[in-house]
Image (tube, rainbow, N blue to C red):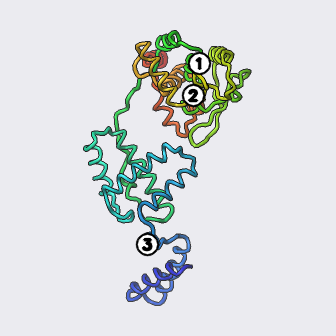
Amino acid sequence: MNKLKSEVIAQIQNRMKPYLNQGTYLRLTKVLMEVFNEIEIVDQKIITELNNYELLELFLSAKKIEGCSSKTIDYYESTIKRMFIKINKKIENISTEDIRIYLIKYKESNSLSKITIDNVRRIFSSFFTWLEDEGYILKNPVKRIHRIKSPRIIRNTFTDEDFEKMCNNCNNLRDLAIIELLISTGMRVGELVNLNIEDIDFNERECIVFGKGESERVVYFDARCKLHLLDYLTSRNDNNPALFVSLKKPYKRLGRNGVEITLTKLGKRCGIKNVHPHMFRRTFATNAIDKGMPIEQVQRLLGHIQIDTTMKYAMVNQSNVKIAHRKFLG
């Protein structure tokens, strides 16, 4: 037993000694030793050796090891640093009330939605939970701040007509192959731009993508997508191993911004609002569920850890709900 535990036991013994006889005193000592052998006590003196920003750096390092993207790490860092500046207390002295007041003022001063504020709360929860688990604080002040409820928003998806319009308005084989692959697989735009030609198995109509946290999964594409991909690759005369490259020399790998700009322009030509990569992913999930694919399989195809995340992407078609009601409930 370490020195700190022995000191705590001695203090309890001294305070209780006037109220106990010899037998109960010995029994108390035995129980204390058994209990303290099963728990870990953090010395508050150790906590004060690190300042808020040093502890934040340790937290961010842990997140990097877990596989969080640089974009996520930057968001965590800026969000937590903003809180440090406003609350202006040492981490071990930040209370639940401090966090609540901060969230309220931050929401009001920036006119933010409940969803955005709840994202901030989740970041704080992750940070303070890590501090508590690692023994840097004795109590997590965010534990008693519950999830901020917000109305569930049914987001739009592409109709079959929308997609056909986009296909007809693509002015090159590359863009057509891109939208076919996005709608057929539901992959993220970051996964799309990282693909190489050799990653595509045309015989099995599948490819391996690396998702968030460098997780690996297989996605599948249909026969129509296969034909458009082959047409695009046949038309190329460069040696870049990337699946999608720029239309002009030196034919560099197409990046995330390039895809987003391409789709925005395509949407304007078609008269369709909010054409962006994520909408293809949401449409894929919705179509899969509408056609009867089990939600667990959709979850796997999308690469989600939590099934709740998959449900947020999927909007069950109301006409299908009506048909199901008549079928099962008369």
Q: Quadrant of the N terminus?
A: bottom right
**Quadrant of res 318:** top left
Amino acid type, label 3:
Gln
Mark 1 and mark 3 residues within 8 Å of each other at the beta carbon: no
| Residue under numbered circle 1 | 174
Judge left or right: residue 247 versus residue 19.
right
At 43% across and 82% down in the image, what residue appears? Answer: 12
Mark closest to the chain's N terminus, 1 or 3:
3
Q: CA separation, marks 2 and 1?
A: 10 Å
Which quadrant of the view contains residue 50? Answer: bottom left
Q: Is residue 329 visible?
A: no
Is the residue marked by circle 2 packed among few (<14), some (14-19), or many (20+) residues within 10 Å? some
Q: Are marks 2 and 1 in contact (CB under 8 Å)?
A: yes
Q: Which residue is mark 2?
A: 254
Residue displayed at 43% across by 57% down: 128
Secondary element at tag 3: helix
Looking at the picture, which amino acid does disc 1 mark?
Arg
What is the secondary structure assignment of the residue under circle 1? helix
Q: Residue at x 55, y 74 (%)?
A: 37
On the image, numbered disc 3 is attached to which residue?
44
At a point 28% along the width and 42% down the height, the residue shown is: 110
Cβ–Cβ under 8 Å for marks 2 and 3: no
Above/below status of 62 relative to 4: above
Mark 1 or 3, which is nearer the eye? 1
Residue 67 on image: x %, y %: 57, 47
**In x, y percent, where is residue 113?**
32, 38
Q: CA distance from mark 2 to mark 3?
A: 52 Å
